[in-house]
């Protein structure tokens, strides 16, 4: 299977207080279609920056990123980002309108009625049926993130970029959203790059886990995760996997 | 809910309490201020020249050494009238029409004396305008305010010219005399200005500026421009001060008439004008400083007929204090 | 929940009415006591009958409409200028500096203080009154729009770009609705200032040709010492103020920013 996304020797630095700070140093990896890839590492290791580069929100200094053999030059509806912030929904639109909004811009070839059906379908998939006419400020944090996921998925992006989307949620909600995300991933055969600092979350969700160290970072290791799904957090295999990655991060 | 009404009741009681207290304060203040004070309100202009003489030569002060004399120069007649209603002013100077409006509305005041007659009239810079009949609907006329003597005289002229006293009402622009003069000199928005000295003289000094209408033409005869009005409260409660004021006023008027040169040099300082100019103004045709009150009935009849006022007086005692020099 | 809300709203209006009645009673007591001259402190029924007279002969209605039409024209013009200036400021920092300098110079100047200049430049007609209205509305509106644009979370723009919007699309679909709370606040301040400005400007300029507005009506009532009529005019001013601020803006906020949880 060919790679959907190729990242070759990416370097990135910022200017902070008139000093150059290297964040990423010659990072390379590939992502296959349909893969669920997680990137873990301590905070400040540049994993979010890396995701931003893939999203096209920022420019890299060296190297290149190819998406389907084309270099990434800017943001595109092919690569949709879901953020950690709860205010990624537009407060002036209802839940349904928020999901419908990108469809109305990009999928004008579909009739409006069908667009609405599509949006409702994805809301159903994230278990938000009945909340179509709520405004974001009337939702809990978990519901907001589910709406954001529905909005992203409704666009059927070729790759879904998730930047610690569950980072601000309580454990219970987070676990619940993780299982919803896995179901969705299976159902629509999405390709997902998932950034998190929660190792357990990475092990629950992904096929492959990239471990990054402290900046300036290159990849420390890439770990394949073949545990059977659905994964049992209390099984020995799971715990060992978590420990293996934990040791890699700590190194 | 029940708690709320209780709070309300307390609030109401408090508010009434405060109001009653403050009212008491007001009345008390007024009583004490009455005896040793005289508060006189005037406006700016040569028509008020005797008052400047009174101030400068301390005529009133010599007669009333124990009394505090307070002069107030106000921007317009309405302010003077409001000051007299609220008992901030004892004697006010104004034209006859604003006095009649106040009297009609029930103000307890009467005329104490005449002060001056002045050449007042409508000035324009437009060659084509030689009578008010030449004014088109695009010609705007500046004057101090509706109900002023300028407005009433213009209405009188309209009634004579068009048989409709309100004909020009929608073309009026309210402006204080100096603003009106500047607007007329700018030759832009204002075609004509109904004004009085010194503005009327200054405007006529410009080339091409001419008089369309004089006050006398509008009225059909000459009349008193400015009168002094005293409130009943002041007249009755402080009759000695009142008498002293009248005597001083008449002395000042006589002084201007008897010593125009000397008066002109005093006034030149007061008005910040060259002495020759002042002398020319105060001795001009139509300028008269006199205690005589003239034209009262003509104004009353006209204003009653045109609904500016709803009452007219049956006998002169209703509008004049005793011993006023009156001419029909 | 909904019933409770309604009850609360009713209560608010009942409370308002209650206080108006109380103030009215106090007024009437003072008027009847004759502590003040009745010419300056008329009884309520005198005020109301004068108001009814002015309403039925149509004058006050025409004059109110005239004042409102002046405001409408002034606010519309100010709105266009404010959107253009703040929009350009959002794009260019140099231009923002220019607009901020303009605000620093012009904002503290009361419109009435500019009158002599306005008379020289524009004259004394409607244009001058509209100019004063624009002056009083424009600066608070621009200030609020600038703050509004600045306070928009950066993430909105990112999302807009991610979903394929171009610059115009981002302005149309994201920046404008996101800045709406500030826009409404600016409009509210602008309205309040315009309403005061138009009344005071009309009192100075008078009915420069035509029927004049509410300010002129009040001025005329004053010079003819029609105090009950003057109070009638004031009641209309208060009434319009309440109508616009408590009903129009309240409704507008209720169906927009308060519904969206965006109140500032």
Image (cartoon, coloured by chain):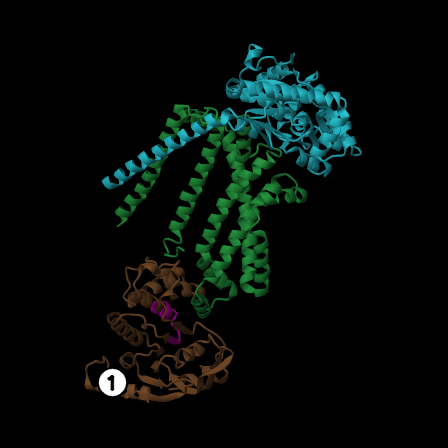
Mark 1, residue position:
A227
Q: Is residue B306 visible?
A: no
In the figure, the green chain has which letter?
C
Which stretch is magenta?
Answer: A149-161
Number of labelled discs?
1
Give A76 or B77, whichever is nearer the viewer.
B77
Report the side of B237 relative to B128 (left or right).
left
The residue nearer to you, when weighing C184 against B198, is B198
Question: Can you see residue A214?
Answer: yes
The x and y percentages for residue C84 are: 56, 56
What residue occupies the far top of the structure in this picture? B315
Q: Report the residue at 38% width, 62% height from top.
A: A98
Please report the residue visible at 33 percent of the width from the left and 89 percent of the height from the top: A251
Which of A243 and A251 lies nearest the eye of the viewer? A251
State the SS at label 1.
loop
Residue B93 on image: x %, y %: 61, 25
- For image coordinates 33% across by 57% down, the residue present is A133
Residue A223 is covered by the magenta coloring: no
User: Of A7 and B214, which appears nearest the observer?
Assistant: B214
Image position of B135 with respect to B309: above or below? below
Chain of the residue where label 1 is placed in the rendered structure: A
Q: Classify mark 1: residues with Cα within 10 Å, few (<14), some (14-19) or many (20+).
A: some
Q: Determine which quarter of the picture holds residue B286.
A: top right
Residue B73 percent location from the top left of the image: 61, 32
Quarter of the figure that contains the N terminus of chain A: bottom left
| Furthest-right residue in this view | B207
Instruction: Tell me the colour chain A is drawn in.
Output: brown
Q: Position of residue C137 (x, y in %)?
A: 53, 48
Horizontal side of residue C162 vs B145, given as left or right: left
Q: Is residue B263 above or below residue C86?
A: above
Q: Colour of chain B?
A: cyan
């Amino acid at each position: 299977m060919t790679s959907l996304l190729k990242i070759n020797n990416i370097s990135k630095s910022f200017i902070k207080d008139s000093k150059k700070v290297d964040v990423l140093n010659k990072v390379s990896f590939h992502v296959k279609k349909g893969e669920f890839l997680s990137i873990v590492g301590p905070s400040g290791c540049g994993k979010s920056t890396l995701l931003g580069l893939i999203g096209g929100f920022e420019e890299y200094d060296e190297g290149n990123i190819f998406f389907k053999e084309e270099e990434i030059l800017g943001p595109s509806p092919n690569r949709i980002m879901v953020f950690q912030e709860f205010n990624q929904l537009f407060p002036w639109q209802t839940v349904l309108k928020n999901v419908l909004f990108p469809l109305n811009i990009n999928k004008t070839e579909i009739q409006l009625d069908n667009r609405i059906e599509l949006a409702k379908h994805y809301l159903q998939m994230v278990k938000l049926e009945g909340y179509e006419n709520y405004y974001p400020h009337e939702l809990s944090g978990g519901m907001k993130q589910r709406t954001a996921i529905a909005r992203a998925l409704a666009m059927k992006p070729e790759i879904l970029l998730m930047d610690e989307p569950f980072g601000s949620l309580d454990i219970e909600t987070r676990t619940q959203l993780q299982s919803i995300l896995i179901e969705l991933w299976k159902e629509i055969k999405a390709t997902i790059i998932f950034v998190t600092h929660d190792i357990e979350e990475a092990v629950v969700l992904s096929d492959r886990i990239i471990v990054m160290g402290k900046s300036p970072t290159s990849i420390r290791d890439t770990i394949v995760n073949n545990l059977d799904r659905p994964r049992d957090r209390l099984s020995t295999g799971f715990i060992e996997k978590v420990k293996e990655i934990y040791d890699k991060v700590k190194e | 809910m029940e708690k709320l009404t209780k709070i309300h009741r307390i609030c109401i009681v408090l508010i009434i309490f405060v109001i009653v207290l403050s009212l008491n304060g007001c009345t008390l203040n007024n009583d004490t201020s009455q005896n040793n004070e005289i508060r006189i309100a005037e406006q700016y202009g040569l028509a008020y020249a005797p008052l400047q003489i009174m101030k400068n030569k301390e005529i009133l002060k010599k007669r009333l050494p124990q009394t505090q004399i307070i002069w107030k120069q106000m921007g317009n007649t309405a302010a003077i009238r409001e000051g007299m209603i609220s008992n901030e002013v004892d004697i006010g100077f104004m034209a006859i029409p604003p006095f009649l409006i106040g009297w009609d509305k029930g103000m307890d005041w009467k005329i104490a004396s005449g002060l001056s007659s002045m050449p007042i009239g409508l000035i324009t810079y437009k060659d084509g305008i030689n009578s008010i009949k030449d004014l088109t609907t695009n010609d705007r006329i500046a004057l101090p305010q509706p109900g002023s003597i300028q407005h009433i005289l213009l209405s009188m002229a309209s009634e004579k010219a068009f048989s409709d006293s309100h004909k020009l009402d929608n073309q009026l622009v309210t402006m204080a005399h100096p603003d009106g003069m500047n607007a007329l000199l700018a030759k832009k928005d204002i075609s004509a200005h109904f004004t009085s000295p010194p503005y009327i003289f200054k405007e006529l000094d410009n080339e091409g500026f001419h008089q369309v209408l004089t006050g006398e033409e509008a009225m059909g005869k000459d009349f008193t421009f400015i009168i002094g009005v005293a409130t009943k409260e002041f007249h009755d409660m402080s009759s000695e001060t009142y008498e002293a004021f009248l005597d001083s006023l008449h002395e000042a008027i006589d002084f201007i008439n008897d010593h125009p040169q000397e008066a002109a040099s005093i006034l030149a300082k007061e008005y910040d004008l060259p002495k020759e100019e002042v002398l020319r103004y105060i001795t001009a045709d139509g300028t008269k400083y006199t205690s005589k009150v003239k034209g009262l009935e003509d104004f009353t009849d006209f204003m009653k007929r045109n609904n500016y006022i709803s009452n007219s007086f049956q006998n002169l005692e209703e509008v004049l204090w005793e011993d006023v020099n009156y001419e029909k | 929940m909904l019933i409770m809300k309604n009850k609360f709203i009713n209560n608010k209006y009942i409370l308002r009415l209650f206080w108006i009645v109380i103030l009215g009673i106090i007024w009437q007591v003072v008027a009847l006591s004759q502590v003040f001259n009745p010419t300056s402190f008329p009884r309520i029924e005198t005020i109301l009958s004068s108001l009814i007279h002015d309403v039925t002969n149509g004058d006050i209605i025409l004059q109110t409409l005239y004042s409102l039409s002046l405001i409408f024209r002034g606010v519309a013009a100010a709105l266009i200028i404010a959107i253009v200036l703040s929009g350009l400021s959002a794009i260019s920092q140099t231009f923002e500096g220019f607009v901020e300098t303009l605000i620093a110079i012009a904002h503290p100047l009361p419109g009435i203080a500019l009158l002599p200049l306005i008379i020289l430049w524009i004259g004394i007609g409607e244009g001058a009154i509209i100019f004063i209205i624009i002056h009083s509305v424009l600066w608070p509106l621009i200030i609020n729009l600038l703050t509004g644009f600045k306070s928009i979370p950066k993430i909105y723009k990112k999302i807009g770009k991610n979903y394929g919007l171009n610059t115009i699309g981002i302005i149309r679909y994201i920046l404008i609705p996101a800045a709406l709370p500030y826009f409404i606040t600016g409009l509210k301040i602008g309205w309040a200032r315009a309403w005061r400005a138009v009344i005071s400007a009309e009192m100075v300029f008078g009915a420069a040709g035509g029927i004049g507005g509410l300010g002129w009506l009040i001025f005329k009532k004053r010079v003819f010492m029609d105090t009950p009529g003057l109070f009638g005019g004031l009641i209309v001013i208060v009434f319009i103020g309440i109508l616009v601020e408590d009903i129009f803006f309240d409704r507008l906020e209720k169906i927009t920013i308060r519904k969206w949880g965006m109140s500032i």
